[in-house]
Image (cartoon, rainbow, N blue to C red):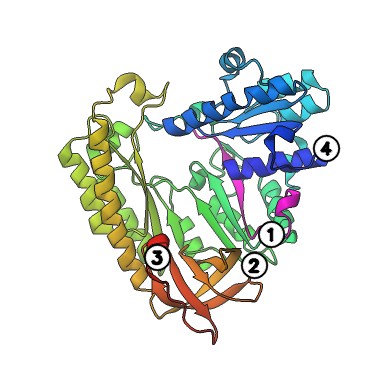
Amino acid sequence: MNVADSQRVSSALERLGYESTRVVEEADVIVLNTCVVRQSAEDKAYGRLTSLQPIKKNRPGTVINLMGCLVGVKNTEVLQKRFPYVDVFSPPSDPAPLIHFLTQEETRAEEALRTGERFAFMDGDLPLPVHERGKLVSAFIPVVYGCSHACTYCIIPYRRGVEQSRPPEEILREAGSLVAQGVKEITLLGQIVDRYGVDNPDFPTLAGLLRRLNEIDGLERIRFLTSHPNWITDELLETAAELPKVMPHIEVPSQAGDSEVLANMRRGYTNEDYYRLVECIRSKIAGVSIATDIIVGFPGESEAQFMGTYHQLQDLRLDVVHLARYSPRTGTVSERRMPDDVPEHEKWRRFRLLEELQEGIAAEISAGYLGRTVRVLFEEKRKGRWQGRTETNKLVFVESDVNLRGQVRPVKISWTGPWSMLGSIGGAPPLLPNREEQLVLS
């Protein structure tokens, strides 16, 4: 979501005549886009913001804009007192306060921050920033802002506000604009993306939106994330299975493998429900890959409850697991009412056990691709090799002198590791890594 937000800010600034620079000390405008989903991310944002103070002192005319979840929708007054050298505060996903400030419309900037007004270009016309034009193959499109679910550990509803779906016409125009600029793949974003349209009866469901996007000429692939077990419908799964441009990859967090822990998290489903959902997804979408999120060390999580999570991953053998150690976020229900009683060293132990388990599972899943030919959409060249992804979102590298950016090519897989694969196109010789490369790619 922050990548998409930053692109929107860049696009808006370029419309005002600004150009990007890699040297922060030379910038006339500095935008710090922040994330606070974990404590480490918030600490990093504060550290970076503090490092900008000398720049402001040396060049008082430099405009510093703090944006994103650190600002949130109600956190401005506290930040203004703590960081008086910041000129503009912008809530997530909206450059309106910054643009109004730069055009000497300070009153409108304050009004935009207060009312949540979105800048005019959010109507769907999104020119990519200059440095990404002709280079960006895969792009993100937010379709649902905010979240109204409020899991007990999650800060997002407090910082990004209530759930709000974007009008479908706006999304379609943005997708068409991106495709016209060379984008081949779009990923629809929402904290709970499956709830698209739930807040507005005049909007289609996510399945209906996917059908309309599938008709855009020149668009090769469509993905969506993040799903929630309570909101994945049969209609959505059947639509994903039917539409050729929707990729067979679902990101649906479990968060824990114990029903009591899930209830304390206020997730709204049981461990058994999650098992049934995975079985349902696999029965409806052939060859689907599934990614999940897991939090270890949630307040009160016992060793037995943690082992429930371990056995869940062991049983379901999912493709990707995003792991996090629980950290209390100020203002959330878990921070106010549940003591953070799992020691840090124990969180790390549980984290590493799951990490080791998933590495073995991922390696076995990848090994099933060895010798197979798969379709890969190539995105960019890195360290002399072209990088792309399969329909199931597996990372693949090939060597080629041909410009493969934005092309979908059949690739025969010659080597597999837990997190990436190597292959060759057509009659090219098979690509095999040396020992050093194996360690890096794994």
Q: Tell me which numbered mark, 2 or 4, is placed earlier along the sequence.
A: 4
Q: Quadrant of residue 413?
A: bottom left
Q: Which residue is mark 4?
A: 16
Q: Amino acid at mark 1?
A: Lys
Residue most extreme to the top: 81
Residue drawn 27% across the image and 47% down it = 352
Q: Residues within 10 Å of mark 2 (few under 14, many from 20)?
A: many
Q: Helix, strand, or loop for circle 4?
A: loop
Depth-wise, is mark 3 or mark 1 nearer the camera? 3
Q: Helix, strand, or loop for circle 2?
A: loop
Q: Helix, strand, or loop for circle 1?
A: loop
Q: Tell me which numbered mark, 4 or 1, is placed earlier along the sequence.
A: 4
Distance from label 4 to label 3 (Cα)? 47 Å
User: Nearest the camera: 317 or 13?
Assistant: 13
Q: Is residue 212 left or right of residue 234?
A: right
Labelled pair 4, 3 in contact (Cβ < 8 Å):
no
Distance from label 1 to label 2 (Cα)? 8 Å
Where residue 433 appears, as percent x and y from the top left, is 42, 72
Residue drawn 41% across the image and 69% down it = 286
Query: Which residues, given as a range, are shown in magenta?
Result: 128-149
Q: Residues within 10 Å of mark 3 (few under 14, many from 20)?
A: few
Is residue 134 magenta-colored? Answer: yes
Q: Residues within 10 Å of mark 1 (few under 14, many from 20)?
A: some
What label does residue 436 carry, if any?
Answer: 3
Q: Is residue 275 left or right of residue 72?
A: left
Depth-wise, is mark 2 or mark 3 nearer the camera? 3
